[in-house]
Amino acid sequence: MPVIECDVEDARARLRDAGAAFQDGKAEHERWHADLGEAHAVAYEGKVVVQGSRPADITSVLASEQSGRVHAYFDGACRGNPGPSAIGWVLVDGDGIVDEGGERIGRATNNQAEYEALIRVLEVADRYGYDEVEVRGDSQLIVKQVKGAWNTNDPELRELRVRVHELLERFDDWSIAHVPREVNDRADDRANEALDDG
């Protein structure tokens, strides 16, 4: 549950501009509540607490505009192939973890879940305003297909790969590389936690 220390009236204005819906606080110490996408925020004196299945829908709006490079880790989890699936992702820059999350995506194959995780981490990195993204994942198939080294014969995966490339075009520079599972363990944890919570 992210906690963002900020001027809560400035936060309210930024969320309003992004299309959030507001309600009055429900207790004396709450200033207001806001909903945007799949995230819910509660404002207190000097801070906003963010909840929901996709906190980045709000945290990316309230974060200071970023620039520079970010490392984006992604992973998909699947129980059965296809089966119940979830995604996990982590954004890391020079100051540490910027944002992370996990969510269930319904029934999917493992490869579909991996692509969905990659799409989500790129969307979040774009919302934060990074110029460069270095993507890391433990799915060799996804990495090779995105690089164009391997063909994408499955029509659904081909559509997902097109979406990935549309998102990558938003960055001034990008790279994608395969990493061992132990390097990607935090994204893996977020995906499995989301799957377990369901």
Image (cartoon, rainbow, N blue to C red):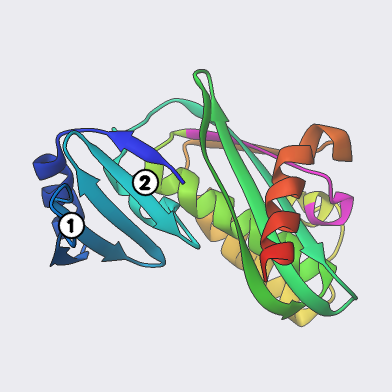
Residue 57, label in figure: none
Q: Compared with residue 9, is residue 153 higher up or lower down, i.e. above or below?
A: below
Is residue 119 visible in the rendered image? The answer is yes
Marks 1 and 2, the one that precedes in the sequence: 1
Task: Tell which tag, 1 or 2, sits nearer the viewer.
Answer: 1
Is residue 68 toward the left or the right of residue 84 in the image?
left
* Tag 1 secondary structure: loop
The image shows residue 162 at horizontal and vertical percentages of 62, 66
**Which secondary structure, mark 2?**
helix
The three-letter code of the residue at mark 1 reads Ala
Is disc 2 surrounded by few (<14), some (14 to 19) or many (20+) residues within 10 Å? many
The residue at which mark 2 appears reads as: 59
Residue wearing tag 1? 27
Bounds of the magenta segment: 132-142
Q: Nearer the viewer, residue 48 or 141?
A: 48
Residue 132 position within the rendered picture, expressed as x and y whole percent measured from the top left = 51, 33
Report the amino acid beneath label 2: Thr
Q: Observer-nearest residue: 122 or 189?
A: 189
Q: Residue at x 30, y 64 (%)?
A: 36
The x and y percentages for residue 97 are: 54, 30
> In percent of the image, x 39 and y 56: which residue is there?
57
